[in-house]
Amino acid sequence: MMEDDFYAVIKLISGEEILSTVCPSSEDDELFLILHNPVVIEVIVMKQIGVQGYKVDPWLKFSDDDTFLLHMDRVITISEIRDPEIIEMYKKFLNQKSEKNFKNSEENDHNFQSVSEARKMFEKLYKEDIKDS
């Protein structure tokens, strides 16, 4: 985290609440926020056992980017997060996401070899099929 960055929850005009590392910025008299690793948090209540928990998901689930610009005209309010438990939960999610991405990239490398091998096998079968025709 850089010196000007801080943890914040942001309420958007869409109704979404985002937790993110935030860096305020301005350019040409326009104020915007730079969000790094924004997430949405859902409160989950298990009434049967009287427990409340949280589900953390990336803000944009299908994006590979981790940094976004948010114009202030989309923001209702912003509040700095100082609660160490919330910050720790956020960091834990980011670490797990990072580890998962690393594992997926290793698996994709392995699958790529399998695809190459499968392509060679299909090319060989195709060539044999043409000979038999």
Image: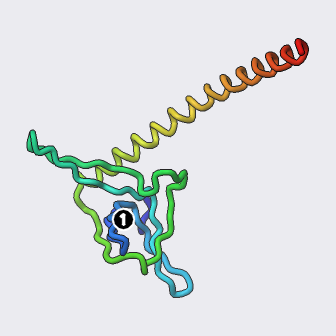
Q: Quadrant of the C terminus?
A: top right
Q: Is residue 91 above or below residue 79?
A: above
Give the residue drawn at x 45%, y 72%.
Answer: 33
Q: Position of residue 128 (x, y in %)?
A: 85, 14
Q: Is residue 87 above or below residue 33?
A: above
Q: Position of residue 127 (x, y in %)?
A: 86, 18
Question: With 133 as the anchor, is 30 left or right in this view?
Answer: left
Q: Position of residue 63 (x, y in %)?
A: 52, 53
Query: Closer to the camera, 125 or 5?
Result: 125
Q: Quadrant of residue 119?
A: top right
Q: Could you tell me the amino acid type at mark 1? A: Phe
Per the image, label 1 sits on a secondary structure element best described as strand
Give the residue drawn at x 46%, y 37%.
Answer: 100
Query: Closer to the camera, 85 or 100?
Result: 100
Question: With 51 as the anchor, is 124 left or right in this view?
Answer: right
Give the residue drawn at x 34%, y 44%.
Answer: 92
Q: Position of residue 116 (x, y in %)?
A: 72, 25
Q: Residues within 10 Å of mark 1 (few under 14, many from 20)?
A: some
Give the residue drawn at x 38%, y 76%.
Answer: 75
Question: With 98 as the anchor, is 13 left or right in this view?
Answer: left
Q: Disc 1 designates what residue?
A: 6
Q: Quadrant of residue 121?
A: top right
